[in-house]
Image (cartoon, rainbow, N blue to C red):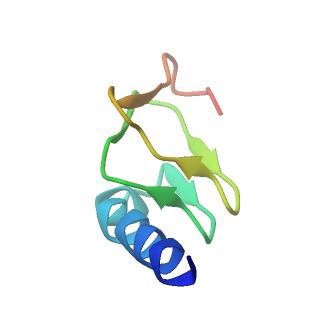
Amino acid sequence: MQLKQTAARSLGWLSSLPFRLNPRIRIGPGLLGNGRLRIQGPGRVVLEADVNAWAHAEVNRLITTRPGAL
């Protein structure tokens, strides 16, 4: 089980690399994801440590609607 969890966390880190380079988005350690996370809009997004963003059928979308949104 440890190997699967490590692989999933590695995939989460790699798939979130474009978000990590964006100054409006802060992602804490331990993101669990499979590349189906979409973040858009003018506001800031903060994902704290150990967030599970694994999507099975549909995309996980986080949308901010105003520049002052957090």
Furthest residue toward front: 1
Question: Nearest the camera: 15 or 40?
Answer: 15
Q: Position of residue 57 (x, y in %)?
A: 33, 28
Q: Could you say which quadrant of the image residue 58 lies in?
A: top left
Q: How many marks?
A: 0
Q: Position of residue 59 (x, y in %)?
A: 34, 30
Question: Nearest the camera: 14 or 2?
Answer: 2
18 sits to left or right of 24: left
10 shown above or below 15: below
> At 53% across and 72% down in the image, what residue appears?
5
Furthest residue toward right: 49
24 shown above or below 13: above
Question: Nearest the camera: 17 or 69?
Answer: 17
4 sits to left or right of 40: right
> At 50% across and 51% down in the image, what residue appears?
25
59 sits to left or right of 62: left
56 shown above or below 12: above
Q: Position of residue 45 (x, y in %)?
A: 56, 42
Pick the quarter of the image with the C terminus: top right
Q: Could you say which quadrant of the image residue 36 lies in?
A: top left
Q: Position of residue 28 (x, y in %)?
A: 63, 65
Pick the quarter of the image with the N terminus: bottom right
> At 51% across and 32% down in the image, what residue appears?
43
> At 37% across and 60% down in the image, what residue appears?
16
